[in-house]
Image: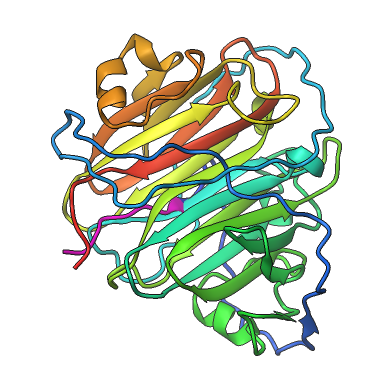
């Protein structure tokens, strides 16, 4: 059977971000520099296995190992607690939506050092998978007060090696995975960014762990969106665990991660919000999670993971290592959902949202 999967999507408040339908003229291509300047790696996650108690019987088949150790630069400060009233709106729905979690995107600050915006994902199974990765900023104008003006995108493998990069999506950067101009292919996918300064790439990847990194500038003008789309969700390999790490603030600076459940079957997922256990100098002190549906209705909330679903989270082998961190186990029917990560006391710091599809299944 094909493993039901997950992939991220469409951050909250993004309904008005339209996708370009242009067919641009291919631009001259560049090549990846052999000496990249940034080397964060995916974030930390335990080995999920076991049988929690929702309607499905979770048994993930890949051990997620995202874990970043860049140089920290920002000290958290106290700010007022935000008011959250979200409603999830994906920006695109490409491909054949099988029984799977089909897309993820996360909106947060994108800075430098330990505050870059990091999206990690795992491809499970035995076959290659084609994905689209995007980094948006200017097209968030009107949705956030301080969008990142010129997002840059890097894709790295599990050892931290740079395997693909893009600055402006209409200018392809050639490298190990991208060997020809991609402008027409990105436009044909329906995922062309609406602004030339935004970044995008289409890559075919083997099973393993990968990290998409969006780099911005330190300061306030830096809200960005990182997205990973499964362009062939019906094949024998699937996107499993996804995670996003970034600097979390209040208001526009809260971390917002969206996902879509495709097909006709329910999916059992675990969403985690981490902070104190992260290996950075300025972790989010007391993460709190909220899960909402497409209409903005709150489905679940959690502040300290052991207080509500502690037994189920432990049975799934996904208990956070710090009691102040958050986790939600939920069985979701097909549809659009959003997870919001903030600090329970309104403080700032680096946080991590993770989404695991723990629905029981096996690869052929």
Magenta span main SS = loop
Q: Position of 74 compared to 89: left or right? A: right
Rendered view: 204 above or below 278: below
2 in the magenta segment:
yes
**Residue furthest left in the image:** 55
60 w.r.t. 136: above or below: above
Residue 276 visible, this angle: yes
Judge by depth and name the residue closer to the eye, 359 or 260: 359
Image location (x, y in percent) of residue 158: 57, 58
Tell which of 284 and 210 is nearer to you. 210
Q: Quadrant of residue 168?
A: bottom right
Extent of the magenta region: 1-8
Query: Looking at the image, which residue is at 58% across and 15% down?
Result: 286
Picture quarter with the C terminus: bottom left
- Left or right of residue 99, residue 71 in this image: right
Number of marks: 0
Residue visible at 65% across and 42% down in the picture: 68
In percent of width and height, residue 350 lies at 67, 30
Q: Is residue 36 above or below residue 41?
A: below
- Indicate the position of residue 352 as horizontal and vertical percent values: 56, 34
Question: Which is nearer the eye, 256 or 163?
Answer: 163
């Amino acid at each position: 059977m094909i493993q039901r999967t997950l992939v991220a999507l469409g951050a909250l408040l993004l309904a008005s971000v339209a996708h370009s339908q242009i067919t641009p003229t291919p631009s001259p291509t560049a090549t990846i520099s052999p000496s990249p300047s940034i080397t964060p790696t995916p974030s930390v996650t335990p080995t999920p296995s076991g049988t929690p108690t929702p309607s499905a019987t979770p048994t993930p088949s890949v051990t997620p190992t995202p874990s970043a150790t860049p140089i920290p630069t920002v000290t958290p400060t106290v700010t007022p607690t935000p008011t959250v009233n979200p409603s999830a709106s994906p920006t695109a729905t490409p491909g054949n939506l099988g029984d799977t979690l089909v897309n993820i995107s996360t909106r947060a600050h994108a800075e430098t050092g330990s505050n870059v915006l990091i999206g990690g994902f795992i491809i499970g199974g035995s076959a290659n998978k084609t994905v689209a990765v995007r980094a948006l900023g200017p097209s968030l104008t009107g949705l956030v007060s301080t969008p990142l003006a010129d997002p840059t995108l890097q894709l790295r493998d599990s050892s931290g090696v740079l395997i693909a990069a893009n600055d402006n999506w209409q200018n392809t950067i050639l490298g190990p995975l991208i060997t020809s101009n991609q402008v027409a292919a990105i436009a044909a996918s329906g995922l062309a960014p609406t602004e030339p300064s935004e970044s995008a790439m289409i890559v075919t990847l083997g099973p393993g762990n990968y990290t998409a990194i969006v780099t911005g500038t330190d300061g306030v003008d830096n809200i960005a969106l990182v997205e990973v789309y499964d362009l062939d969700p019906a094949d024998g390999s699937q996107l499993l665990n996804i995670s996003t790490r970034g600097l979390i603030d209040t208001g526009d600076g809260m971390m917002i991660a969206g996902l879509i459940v495709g097909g006709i079957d329910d999916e059992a997922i675990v969403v985690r919000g981490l902070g104190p256990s992260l290996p950075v100098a300025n972790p989010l002190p007391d993460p709190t999670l909220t899960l909402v549906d497409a209409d903005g209705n709150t489905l679940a909330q959690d502040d300290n993971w052991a207080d509500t679903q502690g037994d189920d989270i432990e049975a799934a082998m996904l208990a956070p290592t710090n009691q102040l961190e958050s986790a939600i186990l939920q069985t979701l029917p097909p549809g659009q959902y959003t997870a919001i990560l903030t600090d329970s006391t309104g403080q700032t710091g680096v946080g991590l949202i993770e989404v695991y599809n723990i629905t029981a299944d096996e690869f052929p």
